């Protein structure tokens, strides 16, 4: 019986130990579960904080924003739209201000250019007026000097009067057009001075250089002229009484001009191969002498009055023609004689 009681007692002790062990294991398990739960909560809190931080840094387009609530997403889009709209409005306003400023600047530059043009025009007008004033002053001084010279030279020989008349004719110019000059007859040498007026050579069919550019009926005789060589019979048959001899050379008259009759005398002397206007039907040498005298009086011709239309005379005629707006024919034509007041 005692052995049986002892076994029962040991079993009870073992049961108590087993129960105590089980309780201890249960407590340990519960404590471990709590710790694990606490760690899980801390981890979740940490992740939540990280998500919130990412959402703050990337309000749109990030993964956190896609996981955010719809209300927050719509609010963010609304704010972004407002910011974009405000930015667009500011940029548009800046563009408008820039455009307005540019337009004002361009208008200001145009106004400055216009003012500069007006200033330049004013300067040109002022310069022109100054030149005209200076010219008028020079003319007055020149006239006073001439008057003083005329008074001073009143008692001198006739050559001083001739110089005074030449100066007056050079100044008056246009007055001679309305008052034809009196024709003079000059006693000329029988033989030409070939040193000052060398003979020209005949060229069959020669035309006046540049005459194709001389417009008007008065210059048609120059445009149509060409040198021709014929014997005496031909010239007599065609022009008969319209032939004169100057320095032994024959000239024929046609359409108001004198021309050299090439071939009439094969060795005839001509200082010029071309037309010479038949002023008052004078022979060519007397026409040339009158023109030389008139050009002397106006300061263009400085050679001898010899009745030869040589290089010096042709140069003086060309200078006069150029200064008076005439074609430079370098010979005696109708417009030049009219300008000189001789026709």
Image: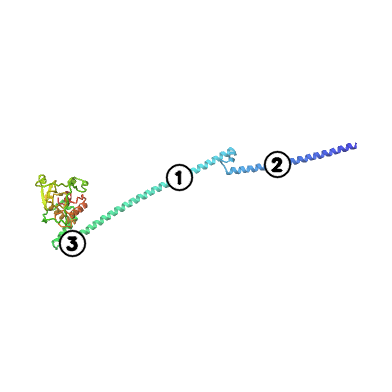
User: Going 83% across and 39% down the picture, which residue do you hit?
Assistant: 14
Is residue 100 shown to the viewer in this render? yes
Secondary structure of the residue carrying numbered label 3: helix
Residue located at (24% from left, 56% from top)? 135
Q: Are marks 2 and 1 in contact (CB under 8 Å)?
A: no
Query: Quick one: label 3, few (<14), some, or many (20+) residues within 10 Å?
Result: few
| Nearest-to-viewer mark from 3 and 2 | 2
- Determine which residue is flagged by label 1: 95
Mark 2: secondary structure: helix
From the image, which quarter does the N terminus lie in? Answer: top right
Q: Nearer the viewer, residue 27 or 101?
A: 27
Give whichever of discs 1 and 3 has the lower sequence position. 1
Question: Is residue 157 placed above or below 227 in the rendered structure?
Answer: below
Q: Is residue 10 above or below residue 261?
A: above
- Count of numbered marks: 3
Q: Residues within 10 Å of mark 2 (few under 14, many from 20)?
A: few
**Visual colour scheme:** rainbow
Q: Which mark is residue 250?
A: none
* Most distant residue in the right direction: 1
x 62%, y 43%: residue = 50
Is 45 rendered above or below residue 322?
above
Label 3 or label 2, whichever comes before in sequence order? 2
- Residue 139, how many percent across, how many down? 22, 57
Query: In terms of secondary structure, where does tag 1 sit?
Result: helix
Identify residue for label 3. Answer: 149
In this view of the protein, which residue sits in the foreground, 65 or 331?
331
**Quadrant of the rendered image containing residue 164:** bottom left
Residue tagged 2: 36
State the image coordinates of residue 318 (x, y, percent, origin top left).
20, 52
**In the figure, residue 68 lies in which quadrant?**
top right
C-alpha separation, residue under disc 2 versus residue under disc 1: 63 Å
């Amino acid at each position: 019986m005692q052995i049986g009681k002892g076994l029962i007692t040991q079993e009870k002790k073992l049961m108590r130990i087993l129960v105590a062990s089980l309780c201890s294991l249960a407590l340990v398990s519960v404590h471990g579960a709590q710790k694990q739960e606490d760690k899980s909560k801390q981890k979740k809190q940490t992740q939540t904080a990280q998500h919130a931080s990412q959402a703050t840094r990337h309000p749109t387009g990030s993964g956190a924003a896609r996981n955010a609530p719809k209300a927050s997403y719509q609010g963010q889009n609304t704010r972004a739209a407002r910011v974009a709209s405000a930015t667009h409005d500011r940029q548009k306003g800046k563009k408008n201000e820039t455009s307005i400023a540019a337009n004002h600047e361009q208008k200001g530059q145009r106004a400055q250019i216009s003012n500069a043009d007006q200033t330049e025009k004013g300067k040109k007008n002022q310069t022109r007026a100054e030149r005209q004033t200076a010219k008028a002053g020079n003319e007055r001084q020149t006239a006073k000097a001439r008057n003083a010279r005329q008074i001073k030279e009143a008692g001198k020989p006739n050559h001083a009067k001739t110089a005074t008349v030449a100066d007056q004719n050079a100044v008056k110019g246009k007055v001679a057009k309305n008052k034809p000059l009196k024709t003079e007859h000059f006693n000329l040498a029988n033989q030409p001075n070939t040193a000052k007026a060398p003979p020209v050579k005949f060229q069959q069919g020669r035309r006046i250089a540049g005459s194709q550019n001389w417009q008007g009926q008065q210059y048609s005789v120059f445009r149509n002229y060409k040198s021709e060589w014929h014997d005496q019979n031909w010239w007599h048959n065609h022009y008969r009484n319209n032939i004169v001899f100057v320095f032994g050379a024959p000239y024929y008259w046609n359409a108001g001009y004198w021309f050299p009759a090439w071939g009439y005398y094969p060795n005839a002397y001509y200082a010029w191969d071309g037309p010479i206007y038949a002023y008052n039907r004078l022979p060519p040498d007397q026409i040339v002498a009158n023109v030389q005298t008139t050009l002397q009086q106006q300061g263009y011709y400085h050679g001898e009055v010899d009745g030869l239309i040589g290089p010096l005379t042709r140069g003086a005629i060309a200078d006069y023609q150029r200064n008076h707006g005439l074609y430079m024919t370098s010979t005696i034509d109708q417009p030049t004689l009219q300008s000189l007041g001789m026709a």
